Image: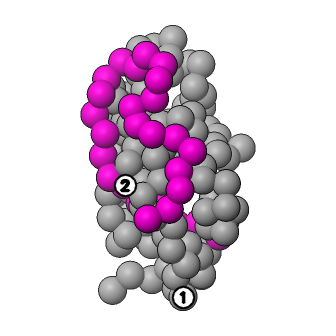
Amino acid sequence: MVWSEHRVPPRRSTFGSQVQTLYHLTPAGAAIRSTGRMLPGSRGKVGGGIYFCHSLTDCSKKSTQGKGWKVTARVLVGRAKELHISQISTHDFTRLQREGFDSIRLIGLTCGVEYVVFNADQVELVSVEQMRSCVVQ
């Protein structure tokens, strides 16, 4: 178990209440473990968010890092906006809120479904573990 700055659901109002246990692979695991939180990146398929998969196998298919850290988190996906890979456009927290959504469910990828959140308070860390390889058998 790892310390987490946030608990889900967040204290603010959301459009849905669905929470899922999801996975993320990253080279920044030491920083995540020490701060107890994940921050949105500056870029990605649909914008600078925090990207998650349902399984480590799916994560390893999209990972560009040879080594890294496995993050297991409870993620408030709430009311998810479903986008097909062919419909990609840039999003951020403000746009999703304006449209009445909490997250994006990205489908049509070869690596499986991805969930994207744009606010750190939607991520409650469960574990952050160093891995020797991102390849999952």
In the foreground, 43 or 126: 126
Mark 1 surroundings within 10 Å by alpha-carbon count, few (fewer than 14), some (14 through 19), many (20 or more): few
Q: Which residue position is annotated with label 2?
A: 22
Magenta extent = 1-28
User: What residue is at 36 percent from the left and 18 percent from the top?
Assistant: 15
In the foreground, 70 or 90: 70
Quick one: SS at disc 2? strand
Does the magenta stretch mainly form a helix, a strand or a loop?
Answer: loop
Using the rendered image of the protein, determine whether residue 84 is visible from the camera's viewpoint.
Answer: no
Quick one: SS at disc 1? loop
In the foreground, 104 or 6: 6
Does residue 38 lie above or below 15 as drawn? below
Instruction: Please count the marks in the image.
Output: 2
Q: Could you tell me the amino acid type at mark 2?
A: Leu
Separation (CA) of disc 2 from disc 1: 20 Å
Is 130 situated left or right of 57 in this image? right
Q: Could you tell me the amino acid type at mark 1?
A: Arg
Residue 116 x/y as whole percent = 47, 42
Q: Which residue position is annotated with label 1?
A: 132
Q: Earlier in the sequence, mark 2 or mark 1?
A: 2
Using the rendered image of the protein, determine whether residue 132 is visible from the camera's viewpoint.
Answer: yes
